Image (spheres, grey):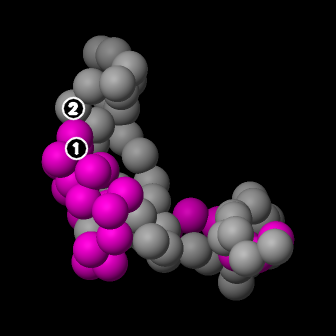
């Protein structure tokens, strides 16, 4: 079975935010549900980011999408 093109998103890419990029993502994917991954959020010069983290209490909540055409 081939790997399915799932994408985990947080912050302004989540569907509920209504940002231009979240609207674009919604147009090219199907929502799967909520998800979480171990990680930590940070900002550099006003830009958000996320890094992986192994601490037991470090989780980032987000949404999981299934991309219609990951190459696009």
Residue at left offset 70%, top offset 84% = 57
Residue 20: say if magenta. Answer: yes
Screen quadrant of the N terminus: top left
Q: Nearer the viewer, residue 27 or 3?
A: 27
Instruction: Specify the quadrant of the image occupied by residue 34.
Output: bottom left
The residue under label 1 is 29
- Label 2: few (<14), some (14–19) or many (≥20) C-alpha neighbours in 10 Å: some
Instruction: Specify the quadrant of the image occupied by residue 53.
Output: bottom right
Mark 1 vs mark 2, CA separation in Å? 5 Å
Q: Is residue 69 above or below residue 32?
A: above
Residue at left offset 22%, top offset 44% = 29
Mark closest to the chain's N terminus, 1 or 2: 1
Residue at left offset 57%, top offset 74% = 60
Q: Nearer the viewer, residue 49 or 47?
A: 47
Q: Nearer the viewer, residue 63 or 69?
A: 69
Instruction: Specify the quadrant of the image occupied by residue 51.
Output: bottom right
SS category of the residue bearing label 2 = loop
* Residue 61 picture location, percent across and down: 48, 75
Q: Is residue 14 left or right of residue 43?
A: left
* Residue 18 picture location, percent across and down: 27, 74
Say the numbered circle drawn on residue 68: 2
Whether residue 21 is visible to the viewer of this picture, yes or no, is yes
- Residue at the outermost top position: 1
Whether residue 35 is visible to the viewer of this picture, yes or no, is no
Residue 24: say if magenta. Answer: yes
Number of numbered callouts drawn: 2
- Label 1: few (<14), some (14–19) or many (≥20) C-alpha neighbours in 10 Å: some
Say whether marks 1 and 2 touch (CB < 8 Å).
Answer: yes
Q: Over which residues does the magenta segment extend?
A: 16-44
* Residue 15 picture location, percent across and down: 27, 68
SS category of the residue bearing label 1 = strand
Screen quadrant of the C terminus: top left
């Amino acid at each position: 079975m081939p790997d399915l093109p799932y994408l985990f998103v947080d912050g302004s890419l989540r569907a509920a935010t209504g940002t231009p990029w979240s609207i674009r993502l919604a147009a090219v994917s199907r929502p799967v549900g909520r998800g979480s991954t171990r990680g930590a959020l940070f900002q550099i010069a006003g830009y958000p980011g996320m890094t992986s983290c192994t601490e037991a209490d470090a989780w980032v909540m987000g949404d999981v999408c299934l991309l219609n055409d990951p190459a696009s």
